[in-house]
Amino acid sequence: SPADIENGRRAYELDRAHVFHSWQAQALFEPMTVLAASGSHVWDGKGNRLIDLSSQLVNTNIGHQHPAVVAAIQEQAGRLCTIAPQHVNDMRSEAARLVSELTPQGLDTVFFTNGGADANEHAIRMARLHTGRQKVLSAYRSYHGGTQLAVNVTGDPRRFANDYFGEGVVHFMPAYTYRSYFGSTTEEEESERALRHLEDMILLEGPQNIAALILETIPGTAGIYLPPPGYLAGVRELTRRHGIVLIADEVMAGFGRSGAWFAFDHWDLTPDLITFAKGINSGYVPLGGVVISDEIAATFDERAYPGGLTYSGHPLACAAAVATITAMREEGMIENAARLGREVIGPRLREIAERHPSVGEVRGIGCFWAVELVKNRETREPLAPYGGSSPAMTELTKALKDGGVLPFVNFNRVHVVPPLNIADDDLLAGLAVLDEALEVADAHVE
Ligand code: PLP
């Protein structure tokens, strides 16, 4: 309505005057106003409806305003809005039970945080205290969060301005077949060579000094490059052999995104610590956490854990998590995500790849897909430089929005990461917009 649009206009002015935004040069930033959102749709400041193929920051796995989750938050607000973390709370207890039911046997304890970054910070702290070691191995081309240690273990350019020495973080090259650092031409080769590299790194850094290896099971923002067969099993074997705590960062990949509750379910991996956030309650109320193996949990049986948060296991966030997990189960959202990947997104993206010379590779699983764009299919030169953008990518993003799609774009990639319960028709409509918009990218092919 005109009143909504006027309200949005005023909100924009106040935003530009008073709100400081994440990751932006504040004076150059032109944020999009969202007047409303429902299911897989958002309405921009002019009242245009967009299909959300981004799930915001890949977190609204159940879409916007799921009625059961909204009702659960409202009900909990009426019962008890907040309580200090040292007290027992029924919603926190139930959320912890549900999460530990979903994770492998032997991981039965949950420490709740406010989001993904602090989950990783705490996981690393636990690993260091448990092992008595200091160093942390993490992959280049990864993202683990914006706080100090989390951004240091991050392997994408967001860490550059925050890189301080002395954190004990050492980066290794992950397995990434399309842009193999190791010159591999097959997945088998990539897996084997990346594991040999990792084994060398461990030996050269001194296994006795390495507390943890942190890895996104399927790297998200860094490119949704799936681990080749054997890679995760190899990482598990190496870390186990050397007494290194394996932390699986499932912040983006977890809670159904990949068509399984956790991405490691696809490869039968049992990590020592699992970090989660985003999809646990689709971000309706901020929540993250660490699922802790019984062995590591035992370290803190007789010895106090030196860490905590005022809002650990916040009742509103936990009530939202209980309702979200329940809705996901009852509505078969995990199975639906798997089906959408297998029957809709995968086939349609492969068709799109055939039609457009700017598409270097499409890859993914469930509702977790990347379209990697190149100037040239032979050389695989990316359509935007690593860590940056380009006129081609800017034009493509604009074409997607003009066509009615809210995209997730990173460097030279468009990610197709819709809510797991998006209607097939909406998804197909969004993919048709992508198909057409890619002609803009094709014009930049050399
Ligand atoms: N880990 C991964 C894999 C992520 O994708 C993100 C956020 O995008 C984080 C950690 C950080 O989570 P948060 O922004 O909730 O701190």
Image: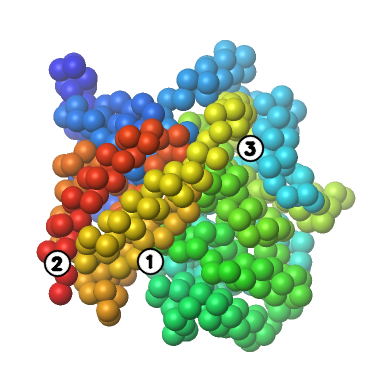
Q: Splitting the image into 4 quarters, where does residue 199 fall?
A: bottom right
Q: Nearer the viewer, residue 135 or 187?
A: 187
Q: Which callout, 2 or 3, points to the residue nearer the camera?
A: 2
Viewer can see residue 437: yes
Give x and y (percent) for residue 182: 47, 84
Tell which of 215 and 177 is nearer to you.
177
Give the residue at x 55% y 29%.
Answer: 331
Earlier sequence position, callout 1 versus callout 3 = 1
Kind of residue indicated by mark 1: Pro
Would you say the residues marked 1 and 3 are in contact, meaning their CB atoms lie under 8 Å apart?
Answer: no
Residue 135: image x %, image y %? Answer: 64, 72
Q: Is residue 429 left or right of residue 295?
A: left
Q: Which residue is mark 3?
A: 312
**Could you tell me if the residues under marks 1 and 2 are in contact, i.e. CB atoms within 8 Å?**
no
Work out whether 339 lies above or below 174. above
Which kind of residue does numbered mark 3 sit on? Answer: Ser
Residue beneath disc 2? 444
Q: Earlier in the sequence, mark 2 or mark 3?
A: 3
The residue sitting at 21% across, 67% down in the picture is 357
Query: Which residue ends up furthest to the top in the rendered image?
Result: 78
Q: Amino acid at mark 2?
A: His
Q: Earlier in the sequence, mark 1 or mark 2?
A: 1
Measuring 18% from the left and 41% from the top, which residue is drawn there?
A: 403
**Disc number for residue 157:** 1
Q: Secondary structure at mark 2?
A: loop
Image quadrant holding the C terminus, namely bottom left
Q: Residue at x 45, y 64 (%)?
A: 225
Q: Secondary structure at mark 3?
A: loop
State the separation of the CA atoms marked 1 and 3.
30 Å
Secondary structure beneath disc 1?
helix
Locate residue 354, reporting x and y percent. Answer: 27, 62
Residue 35 at what x, y percent from top left? 26, 27
